[in-house]
Amino acid sequence: MTSRARGLAAERQARHWLEQRGLRHIESNYRCAMGEIDLVMRDRDTLVFVEVRYRRNAAFGGAAVSVTAPKQRKLKRAVEHYLVARAVSARRPCRIDVLALQAADDAECTVEWIQNAVVGEG
């Protein structure tokens, strides 16, 4: 399986996992010049932008730590672009989450959901 195919499979798994927890899917793979947003979901009245990270092993620190400061800045710029492009009200609550999938064995992954993972100016 290619890395792109693994990434798409992880995004599908992440979407399903979040939907089981009550979030509603809005959009996948929003792309713009600023970057990409893997999933756009809704959690009650909050718009949730989800960065999905998958790692087959934790040799380099695992999935969650792979969301570096430069990646966080890129995510924030992509979210800002999305909000303008989709004419989302400035009063609408928003957050950026990370869903880290770490392969535990061939059959399952551990999931770490970090809400409000990316905050502040940047």
Image (tube, rainbow, N blue to C red):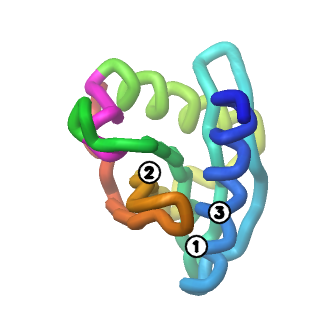
Mark found first going from the N terminus, 1 or 2:
1
Q: Residues within 10 Å of mark 2 (few under 14, many from 20)?
A: many
Mark found first going from the N terminus, 3 or 1:
3
Give the label, 3 or 1, closer to the camera. Answer: 3
Q: Is residue 93 left or right of residue 67?
A: right
Q: Residues within 10 Å of mark 1 (few under 14, many from 20)?
A: some
Q: Is residue 49 left or right of residue 56?
A: right
Q: Between residues 84 and 1, which one lies in front from this camera angle?
A: 1
Q: Find residue 34 and report its horizontal and vertical position in percent.
A: 59, 18
Mark found first going from the N terminus, 2 or 3:
3
Q: Disc 3 marks which amino acid?
A: Gln
Q: Is residue 108 left or right of residue 27?
A: left
The question of residue 64 being in magenta is answered with yes
Q: Secondary structure at mark 3?
A: helix
Q: Residue furthest top?
A: 33
Q: Find residue 111 and report its horizontal and vertical position in percent.
A: 41, 66
Bounds of the magenta segment:
62-69
Q: Find residue 74 and report its horizontal and vertical position in percent.
A: 46, 23
Tell me the distance, in whole angstroms, between the alpha carbons under discs 3 and 1: 9 Å
Q: Secondary structure at mark 2?
A: strand
Going 51% across and 67% down the picture, which residue do you hit?
108
Q: Residues within 10 Å of mark 3 (few under 14, many from 20)?
A: some
Let me know if residue 118 appears in the view. Answer: no
Which residue matches tag 1? 18
Q: Disc 2 marks which amino acid?
A: Ile
Which residue matches tag 3? 13
Q: Quadrant of residue 38?
A: top right
- Which numbered tag is attached to residue 96? 2
